[in-house]
Amino acid sequence: MPRPTAAQLAYGSCTVIFSTLAMLLLSQTSSGLGIAVIALAALALGLLVAMTVPLPKPPAAAPAATTPATAQRVVPAPRKPVAASAEQLREPTAR
């Protein structure tokens, strides 16, 4: 399971807090069971909101221009040996 992004955490947390406050104020409940039900409903709503926040898309891979079946193998041309003259092989003398 991928880790949640910062946006998912923020949206989910804000949803839990604000929906809990709104439901508690609107229902005017004072019983422990009512508060527990509202808290669970707010947690479920926050989870739903956090999971529906769009995830960032991974970077698009560069399209392959050729496939291995159609690719042509490039072979470098063979190099010819170069004969060095005696002057090139001597070390330079300090003057």
Image: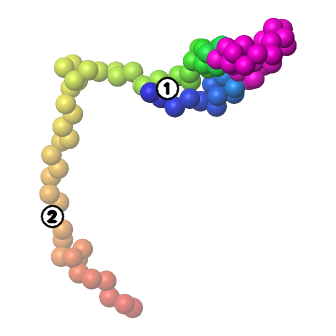
Q: Position of residue 62 (x, y in %)?
A: 42, 25
Q: Is residue 11 magenta?
A: no
Dot label at residue 1: none
In reply to whether residue 16 is colored magenta, the answer given is: yes
Q: Position of residue 72 (x, y in %)?
A: 21, 26
Magenta stretch mostly in which secondary structure?
helix
Q: Which residue is mark 2?
A: 83
Q: Which residue is mark 1?
A: 58
- Foreground pick, 27 / 18: 27
- Report the residue at 72% width, 19% height from top: 32
| Residue type, mark 1 in image | Pro
Residue located at (72% from left, 13% from top)? 34
* Residue type, mark 2 in image: Ala
Above or below, comparing residue 77 to residue 50 in the picture: below
Q: Residue at x 56, y 24 (%)?
A: 56
Q: Position of residue 91 (x, y in %)?
A: 27, 83
Specify the quadrant that holds the C terminus: bottom left
Question: Which of the two residues, 75 or 67, is positioned nearer the viewer here?
Answer: 67
Residue 51 appears anywhere in the view = yes
Q: Nearer the viewer, mark 1 or mark 2?
A: 1
Q: Secondary structure at mark 1?
A: loop
Which mark sits nearer the N-terminus, 1 or 2? 1
Provide the residue span drawn in magenta. 14-40
Q: 49 or 19: which is nearer to us? A: 19
Please report contact status of discs 1 and 2: CB closer than 8 Å, yes or no: no
Q: Is residue 19 visible?
A: no
Quarter holding the N terminus? top left
Q: How many residues crowd mark 2 within 10 Å: few (<14), some (14–19), many (20+)?
A: few
- Looking at this view, name the residue that lies furthest to the bottom: 95
Disc 2 on helix, strand or loop? Answer: loop
